[in-house]
Image (spheres, grey):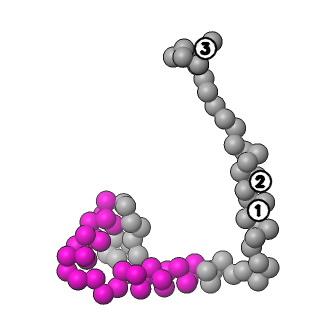
Amino acid sequence: MAPSDPTFDFSVDLSGHEMLRRTHVMAAIEPGWDPVAAMRREEEARALLYSGLDEEQQRIYDELVAAGVLPPGPGDAAA
């Protein structure tokens, strides 16, 4: 079977690379890292980012949330 053959099956197993990536991530995390606090800070930052929108910006934001482009925030009706 040649690569130009329509039935040629090309696949790559990335499981080894994924395990290496996870190992590096875990090694980079500090011992005192608190994932709950980190998520809380992310939610606070997101709320600040999308606060104070004017009417047009809010309309666009609502459309993006409704379309699934942005996740709904805690104060959104779709949340």
Q: Dot 2, crowdedness within 10 Å: few (<14), some or many (≥20)?
A: few
Q: Where is residue 7 in the image (x, y as percent from the top left)?
A: 55, 16
Identity of the residue furthest to the top in this view: 1
Separation of marks 3 and 2 at Cα, in angstroms: 32 Å
Q: Dot 1, crowdedness within 10 Å: few (<14), some or many (≥20)?
A: few
Separation of marks 3 and 1 at Cα, in angstroms: 37 Å
Question: On screen, 18 above or below 77?
Answer: above
Q: Position of residue 27 (x, y in %)?
A: 79, 68
- Asked if the residues shown at circle 3 and circle 2 are in contact, with their CB atoms under 8 angstroms apart, the answer is no
Q: Which amino acid does the dot numbered 2 rest on?
A: Leu
SS class, disc 1 = helix
- Asked if the residues shown at circle 1 and circle 2 are in contact, with their CB atoms under 8 angstroms apart, the answer is yes
The image quarter in which residue 64 lies: bottom left
SS class, disc 2 = helix
Separation of marks 1 and 2 at Cα, in angstroms: 6 Å
Q: Which amino acid does the dot numbered 1 rest on?
A: His
Q: Give the range drawn in magenta.
A: 39-67
SS class, disc 3 = loop
Q: Position of residue 59 (x, y in %)?
A: 22, 73
Q: Name the residue: 40% across, 81% down.
A: 49
> Pointer 1: what residue?
24
Q: Which mark is residue 47?
A: none
Q: Which amino acid does the dot numbered 3 rest on?
A: Ala
**Magenta region includes residue 40:** yes
**Magenta region includes residue 56:** yes
Q: Name the residue: 39% across, 71% down.
A: 72
Q: Describe residue 67's horizontal placement relative to residue 23 as left or right.
A: left
Q: Which quadrant holds the N terminus?
A: top right
Q: Residue 20 carries which label?
A: 2
Q: Name the residue: 73% across, 59% down.
A: 22
> Pointer 3: what residue?
2
Q: Where is residue 68 in the image (x, y as percent from the top left)?
A: 36, 60
